[in-house]
Structure formats: C-alpha cells, structure tokens
C-alpha cells in the first residue's frame, strides 16, 4: 500500500506534470521509472521513503514541467520535457566499468566457427 505522502503525490501532483504517467502495479513498491524517448528504461528511483515535497522536488529537478492546473496548456518549449538535448548525453567512448565494451574493441576475440 502507498504511504500517505506518496499517495498524495500520485493523486494530486501527477496530473499537474507533463509527460509523467502513473502505472499501478498491485503489491509493488512505488518507484519513479525514467524512460528514454524510445521507451528504454534509464533509471528506477524508489519513492517509498520520500515525502511528497521531496518527490515534487525530484521530478522538477529531473526537468518535468509542472502545469498550474491539470488542463493548462504546456508551452511549446516544454512539449518534450524532460527530454534533454542530445549534447548532454554521456559520450559513448567512455563506457562505465560494468558496461560492455563497444563491439569495435572485441573484434578478433571470437574464435572462428
């Protein structure tokens, strides 16, 4: 069950955010799932221990646009919010320690079949 803080955010705040949707999964802990424009999962942030104020601060820091009312128009520049412009994406040349190396680097490592 949702704690009162998270429930208040879900029922009263989510309708004010552009491009933020609620999916109810019975029995699952509440979490914010960030998706790319291609609907690939980018990150999951657990919300159970956060206050309503903290969750609102988080989604605004992530770049979600908050409308005055659920039916208020969204300005043109926020239509795709919180999508970031491409240059801010991490460079592909710098894989993190736990990511696979790009295919170019492991050519020649596969034995011939």
Image: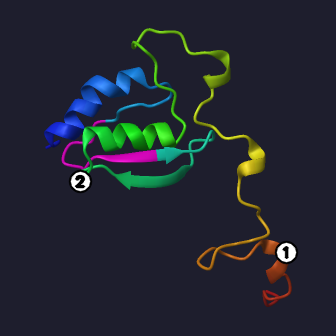
Horizontal arrangement in the rendering, residue 105 relative to residue 18 (left or right): right
Task: Give above or below for 40 relative to 92.
Answer: above
Q: Is residue 3 magenta?
A: no
Residue 18 percent across, percent down from the top left: 49, 24
Residue on which disc 1 sits? 104
Q: Which sits earlier in the primary sequence, circle 2 or circle 1? A: 2
Horizontal arrangement in the rendering, residue 63 relative to residue 111 (left or right): left
Task: Give above or below for 24 relative to 46.
Answer: above
Horizontal arrangement in the rendering, residue 54 relative to residue 6 (left or right): right
Which of the 4 quarters of the picture holds residue 16?
A: top left
Residue ID at (66%, 75%) = 100
Q: How is the image coloured?
A: rainbow
Is the magenta region chiefly helix, strand or loop?
loop
Mark 2 vs mark 1, foreground winner is 2
**What quarter of the picture does the N terminus occupy?**
top left
Residue 49 percent across, percent down from the top left: 23, 53
Residue ID at (20%, 34%) = 7
Question: What secondary structure is found at the residue carrying circle 2?
Answer: loop
Residue ID at (63%, 74%) = 99
**What quarter of the picture does the C terminus occupy?**
bottom right
Foreground of the two, 93 or 38? 93
Residue 87 percent across, percent down from the top left: 78, 48
Query: Which numbered tag is attached to residue 82?
Result: none
Query: Which numbered tag is attached to residue 49?
Result: 2
Residue ID at (80%, 82%) = 106
- The CA distance from mark 2 to mark 1 is 43 Å
Question: What secondary structure is found at the residue carrying circle 1?
Answer: helix
Task: Give above or below for 98 relative to 72.
Answer: below
Give the magenta range. Answer: 24-33
Foreground of the two, 93 or 69? 69
């Amino acid at each position: 069950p949702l704690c009162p803080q998270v429930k208040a955010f879900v029922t009263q705040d989510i309708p004010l955010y552009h491009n933020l949707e609620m999916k109810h999964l019975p029995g699952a802990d509440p979490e914010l799932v960030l998706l790319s424009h291609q609907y690939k999962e980018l990150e999951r942030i657990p919300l159970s221990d956060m206050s309503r104020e903290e969750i609102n601060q988080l989604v605004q820091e992530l770049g979600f646009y908050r409308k005055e009312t659920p039916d208020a128009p969204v300005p043109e520049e926020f239509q795709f919010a919180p999508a970031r412009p491409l240059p801010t994406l991490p460079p592909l040349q710098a894989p993190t320690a736990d990511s696979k190396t790009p295919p170019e680097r492991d050519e020649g490592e596969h034995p011939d079949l």
